[in-house]
Structure formats: structure tokens, C-alpha cells
Amino acid sequence: MHGDQAAPALVLASASPRRRELLARLGIASPQVIATDIDESPVRAELPRAHAVRLAAAKARAAAELAPGALILAGDTVVGVGRRILPKAEDEATARRCLALLSGRRHRVFSAIAVLSPDGTLREALSETIVRFKLLEPAEIEAYIAGGEWHGKAGGYAIQGSAEGFCAWLAGSHSGVVGLPLFETRRLLRAAGLAIA
């Protein structure tokens, strides 16, 4: 913001501690947090990229209704294999299926962000990262399942944890795979008037 006009408060439309930790790397240590409750089910024939973009914008709009006058930052991360959207793993069977599918092959992680200004201006960006996992042995999958890091994670894994040991190579944004692509986030927040060094 310029002149004497105060910058609006920043609201992070996510309860994810990982997103808060990543945002702190940009010098934003304690944003207001509003966890949104929207239907995250894919619509018919929706592709992973479009799914991530749609959900990030929907989360931003839902948070704006709860915090009028705030600057809203929302994000959504989707793991895609071809045209297929992998679920967020809420049980061991789902996590096991995801890891078996990702074993020895490439997949894409789409991390969309949406910044909604108090005047209704929506700024959007998408980070696309290609990740290749090693060929996973059954014992490796079972050990990872036992560790519990997969719970609630898109594609059944958290790259910031021990699953990084499965990652043979990555092309794109590591922070995007974690859940908040910092380059795109910084760019959009600065464009919205937030003072970030």
C-alpha cells in the first residue's frame, strides 16, 4: 500500500502448519488463519491442474466471507498421474495404493495459490513440479505407512519428511510440493500491496 493507507490484514485460508512454516520464510510469521470447509471433490472430467486452481480460488472466496476487508491467501496442492487426481490419503489403504502407483514413475504436483484483495481482485498462480520416485520395495511402503506421515497428504506422501528419500529427482518447486510455492506466493502478495522484502 502507498501513502497513509494501511495495508489490510493477511489471512491464510488454511489450517496447514506446513503452509504457515513456509509463509514464515517470507517474513510473515503470524498471519490470521481461517480454515475453510469447501467440497474438494473433483468435478466430472476435471484435470489435476484445473482442480488445484479451482479449489484455491474457492478457498479464498470462502475465507473472504468470514474476514471481510482482509487480504486472503489460499492454496491447494494436487498430485496428478496423467489425467488422474490422486486423493488425500485418510486411511492406510489409500496411502498404500497411492505409493504403489507412484513407485518407479514420474508424477506431477500442481500447487495453486489465490490471493484475493479486499476490493475483490483475484490474483492466481500455479506451480507445476515433476517428481520421480524410485521403485519402492513393499517393505519400504509398509515402513512409510507405519510412520504415519502420509495422513491427510495429497498422493499419500509428505516430501518434507522421510518420503524425500524416495525422490530420485525433482524439477520445479520443492516448496510447491510441500504445499505453498514461495516464488509465486511472494510475487502475488507483493502485487497485492503487501510489503515483503
Image: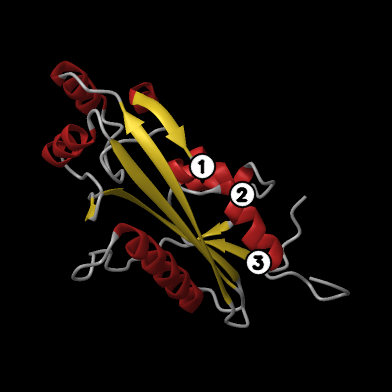
Q: Are marks 2 and 1 in contact (CB under 8 Å)?
A: yes
Q: Amino acid at mark 1?
A: Ser
Instruction: Indicate the amino acid at tag 2.
Output: Phe
**Snapshot quadrant of residue 108:** top left
**Is residue 139 found left or right of 124 in the rendered image?**
left
Residue 141, numbered circle: none
Residue 152: percent from left, percent from top: 28, 45
Image point 38% across, 36% down: which residue?
131
Quarter assignment of residue 85: bottom left
Q: Pinpoint residue 166: horizontal percent, then vertical percent.
A: 33, 24
Q: Secondary structure at mark 1?
A: loop
Callout 3 amino acid: Ala
Kindly identify which residue carries mark 3: 9
Q: Residues within 10 Å of mark 2 (few under 14, many from 20)?
A: some
Q: Position of residue 9 (x, y in %)?
A: 65, 66
Q: Earlier in the sequence, mark 2 or mark 1?
A: 1
Give me the disc on residue 183.
Answer: 2
Comparing 169 with 143, the one in front is 169
Question: Label 1, on which residue?
Answer: 173
Asked which secondary structure carries label 3, the reply is loop
Q: Residue at x 15, y 42 (%)?
A: 94
